[in-house]
Image: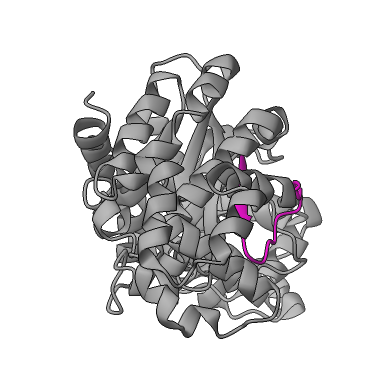
Amino acid sequence: MGIEQILNPAVRSTLHTEEGKTLRDIFNAKLKELNVSQSKVETLISIERKTLNSILDNTAKRIDIVNIIKISHFLGLEINELMVLYAPEMPKEMILEVQTAKDASYIFNNFDIDSLTKIGIISKEDNSQNIRSKIERFFGFSSIYDYTQDTIFPAFSRPKRDSHEQVRAFWIKSAYTQFKLINNPNEYNREDLISLIYKIKPYTRDVRGGLLAVARALFKIGITVIYQPSIQKLQIKGATFSCNGKPCIVLSNLNNRYPTLWFVLLHELYHVLYDFDEISERSYHVSEESSSDLFLLDEISPDEFARDFLLNKERLKFVSGYINSPITVDKCANEWSIHPSIIYAIYMYEAYQNGFTMIWAGPLAKKIPTMEHSLELFNTHPFEKECLEESVKEIKKLIYNI
């Protein structure tokens, strides 16, 4: 039981302590019941008079846990019951120290301090009070302990939580918080998505504005898309969430290649089409290179769907013979309504899968732009903000015009 609970009257009332009685009152009653003197008790339980009086009168600046255990045994009280009597009169400085220690333990158990420092959420100089305050502000919590209270908090796959899972949980919580704040007002209809999805491909040719246009179209049919950068230790490509019963998609920056944005978007849209009921049961699904997800969904079918949608095997086979001819590749890309880099990316991916491990270091890699230009209007830099609400205000205004 934490200090906040001990100080909570509702919790205190559930424990077997006498209403209105102080610790000194109960001690004196026990002496009378047993017909012994205080000095006799001091001798029997091996505690100095000064120490005992300071605890009974709530004047102790420090409490030795061994002495607390001795007194609780003598009085026939559980430790929690004794602390209910003692805590309300504890000096404020002691209460603050106890709460600070509790906060520090909670922070270390649930957050990877090194990663939060690197992305700028906290600084190296921050103590536990500063860290608590910054995390509360970042998420909009009234208490840092809200972090693990709602249903979105990830289930951990390992017996002992590690830094990777702490970072993963933070990434998931950050995305979900933004979706809750955005609160897409449009209704989702699966048939609308089926109609829209086949209109997406030509927008890949517009590096700067295509992704934004598609995201706005998806928003109108109830699907919210945001970008959230990955964090060190993660290999997250994207994720699909269910928020207020509507699909939400996160795109991330794994590999920092422009075609990957479209590949991941289509991958996640497949999950929306075919796995959304299952995802809704647990609120999210993360697509990552090395998944620690307890509830693994089929990731092969979404990958095949994305690749075939952008460039099917027949077209890939044809263009592979002209891959070193930029004119031919550009002509094919124009005819097939895709950006040329998608052809190069899928060709190199297939080559890599077939053992050509150095393909990404070759000249074809220079044909693929980074995500930078396509994210200029899409990236609200959520981890650089003091609070996610600031990021959401930008998303609403700049991306979705609400």
- Residue drawn at (24%, 56%) of the image: 373
The picture places residue 32, in percent across and down from the top left corner, at 72, 52
Determine which quarter of the picture holds residue 220. top left
Q: Is residue 6 visible?
A: no
Q: Where is 45 relative to 333, above or below?
A: below
Q: Where is 60 relative to 193, above or below?
A: below
The coloring applied to the image is one colour
Name the side, left or right, on which 195 lies relative to 26.
Answer: left
Compare residues 76 and 132 and report the one nearer the observer.
132
Q: Is residue 304 visible?
A: yes
The picture places residue 23, in percent across and down from the top left corner, at 57, 52
Q: Where is 92 relative to 153, above or below?
A: below
- Residue drawn at (42%, 74%) of the image: 365
Compare residues 39 and 367 and report the one nearer the observer.
367
Name the side, left or right, on which 83 lies relative to 30.
Answer: left
User: Where does the C terminus fall, quadrant-wise?
Assistant: top left
The picture places residue 284, in percent across and down from the top left corner, at 61, 41
How many marks overall?
Answer: 0
- Residue drawn at (32%, 51%) of the image: 138
Determine which quarter of the picture holds residue 346. bottom right
The majority secondary structure of the magenta stretch comes to loop
Residue 288 in magenta stretch: yes
- Residue drawn at (49%, 56%) of the image: 170
Determine which quarter of the picture holds residue 350. bottom right
Compare residues 385 and 77 and report the one nearer the observer.
385
Stretch in magenta: 284-298
Compare residues 29 and 188 and report the one nearer the observer.
188
Residue 292 in magenta stretch: yes
Name the side, left or right, on which 316 lies relative to 90.
Answer: right
The picture places residue 135, in percent across and down from the top left corner, at 36, 55
